[in-house]
Image (tube, grey):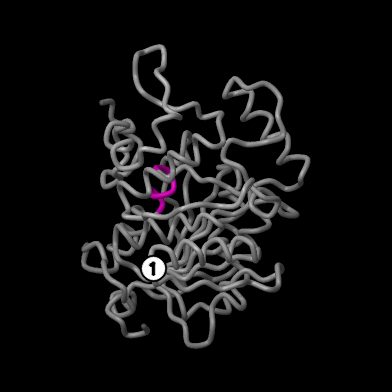
Amino acid sequence: MATKIKLHPRNQHRADYDFVRLVAQSPELEPFTVINPAGQTTIDFKDVLAVRMLNRALLRTYYNINFWDIPADYLCPPIPGRIDYIHYLADLLACDNNQKIPRGRHIKALDIGTGASLVYPLTGQSEYGWHFTGVDIDPIAIKSAEQICKSNKLQITLRLQKNPENILKGAIQPNDAFHITLCNPPFHASMEQATKGTQRKWRNLGKGHSKKLNFGGQNAELWCPGGEIKFISSLVEQSTEFADQCLWFSSLVSKKDNLKPLYKILEKANVDDYKVVEMAQGQKTSRFIAWTYINESQRPLYMNGANG
């Protein structure tokens, strides 16, 4: 099998999808498999249901998630790219943990915009045993996430963000202490821009024109006023209020051009340090930016539970 070099070394999906193993674990995937011109088994990635079945099989086979489903038209995220973010966050935390990858429920992670799929908590908890708190502004997404947790007997804290203007306010409560926050922000600035992006993706998949995405997505998952840069700016601004309640804040940044203005915003916020980590994200190269207000000499104490 070909190796996907760009994916993190600990990513279980660095090789091509093992459809023999996936179908053995999830027989319902088999009707959606096809043989490509190279004679390899795959699925039609233009088929919404096929993508969903693939995700279900991946979560069951690699992450011990026996039940997984999401409401129609909700974002169905590609697992390999999403778990890469978790692996690189683990590396980031290891820098403050004597170069050891931190594992166990004492490591607290906050997933901003966790979505109906709950993909980061599901994969991150399975890989590292961290305790996740997932927050979302959409009641339907939270209800879906609750059903996934209940069906799999998972202990993941879920919180509905009642004020869409808030990102961290209400998500982080007075007695909380997190080691890491993560976020996959809406990157379009308007519904029109999101629709154009959708149509471009369909053309790239050879499907012609369509208003639907094979990976789905509700409005709040795809766009917000001001787009990605405005969202992350607000995230940084609000993070100053919780500077001593979290070791590292982070967010994906899909547009490389947004990094320079973000550097200025972080410097203005008087962060102690910030880092950009390049990685693969689905079929494209992406990155995340992480920042902390805690001095380097104090971070190992935070990792060891001094503030937890």
Residue 55 point in image, percent of width and height: 44, 43
From the viewer's side, name the closer residue of 222 and 236. 222
In terms of secondary structure, where does tag 1 sit? loop
**Residues drawn in magenta:** 80-85
From the viewer's side, name the closer residue of 275 and 220. 220
Report the amino acid beneath label 1: Leu
Looking at the rendered image, the quarter that the C terminus falls into is bottom left
- Looking at the image, which residue is at 27% across and 63% down? 94
- Judge left or right: residue 96 versus residue 30: left
- Looking at the image, which residue is at 38% across and 43% down? 57
Looking at the rendered image, the quarter that the N terminus falls into is top left
- Image quarter of residue 112: bottom right
- Name the residue beneath numbered marker 1: 154
- Looking at the image, which residue is at 44% across and 48% down? 82
Residue 137 point in image, percent of width and height: 65, 66
Q: Is residue 82 magenta?
A: yes
Q: State whether the magenta stretch is mostly helix, strand or loop.
A: helix
From the viewer's side, name the closer residue of 270 and 139. 139
Graded by Cα atoms within 10 Å as few (under 14), some (14 to 19) or many (20 or more), the crowding at tag 1 reads some
Q: Is residue 32 magenta?
A: no
